[in-house]
Amino acid sequence: MANFAETKALTFDLFGTILDLGGSLTPFISESLDAHAAVDVSADEFWAQWRYRQRIEQYQDTITMLGHSGYLETVRRALHYTLRRNGIDAASDTVQAFMRGWQQLSPFPEVLAALSRLQARYQLVVLSNGDPSFLEYLVTERVVWDFDDVISVTSVGAFKPHPAVYRGAAGKLGLEVNECLMVSANSFDIMGARACGYKGAFVNRYELPYEDTSYQPDVTVLDFTALAEALL
């Protein structure tokens, strides 16, 4: 069993880890798709395509080094691609209709109770690909939790899993990398953090395979309730 005695801060991914993206967004996607009756794609499939394409947009943004576009811009670009892939005209009003769900994201139901338990032992920090103003809105209005810090990748100008994200966050917190533990539902996020010296907790709600890499998570759990049990 992993030893977390030296861990001082838990850095949490927000999108898909604390916030339930699929559960929050698919009702809005379904409503928007209903306006395009001839389209033969389910809300779940559309969301899977959109999410996959967003990650490509983020990787391209970081690799090309043409200037950090920001999280919501990569969401918009990915939506534009996914609409056209499904034969839907990516007109501005259509894009706005699909995007409005991002203002209504909600946390998974067990998250807040687990955070209440974990705060007695650890600093709790958001470390997210999100834009600063969007993160402030989500943390205060949607998660409604007073984290010890909220750190955006905008400060280093690159998306996860760029090593500057994890090293920069540890430095901002005044900690060594081995005193930080990344909590994420995204395996690439855990891999990136582990490669930088963090510990990692993989929240694998959907029992997905992990990266074929030597940088394995220190613990894998199904949800935040199990996370609190593992770390306390």
Image: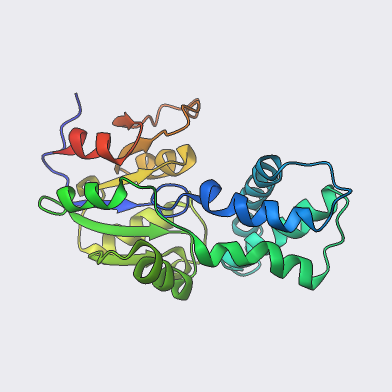
User: In x, y percent, where is residue 72?
Assistant: 59, 66
Q: Is residue 208 above or below residue 29?
A: above
Regarding residue 41, the answer to whether it shows in the image is: yes
Question: In the rendered image, which quarter is residue 231 located in?
Answer: top left
The colouring scheme, among rainbow, by chain, secondary structure or one colour, is: rainbow
For the C terminus, the quadrant is: top left
User: In x, y percent, where is residue 213?
Assistant: 46, 27
| Identity of the residue drawn at 50% across and 28% down | 208
Q: Is residue 63 left or right of residue 105?
A: right
Regarding residue 8, the answer to whether it shows in the image is: no
| Identity of the residue drawn at 21% across and 40% down | 228
Q: Is residue 205 left or right of residue 179?
A: right
Q: Is residue 39 above or below residue 164?
A: above
In front of the other: 46 or 192: 46
Q: Is residue 217 above or below residue 16?
A: above
Question: In the rendered image, which quarter is residue 81 located in?
Answer: bottom right
User: In x, y percent, where is residue 225?
Assistant: 26, 38
Q: How many marks?
A: 0
Question: In the rendered image, which quarter is residue 74 located in?
Answer: bottom right
In front of the other: 166 or 35: 35
| Identity of the residue drawn at 52% across and 61% down | 158
In front of the other: 4 or 203: 203
In front of the other: 167 or 218: 218
| Identity of the residue drawn at 71% across and 45% down | 46
For the N terminus, the quadrant is: top left
Q: Is residue 135 above or below residue 57?
A: below
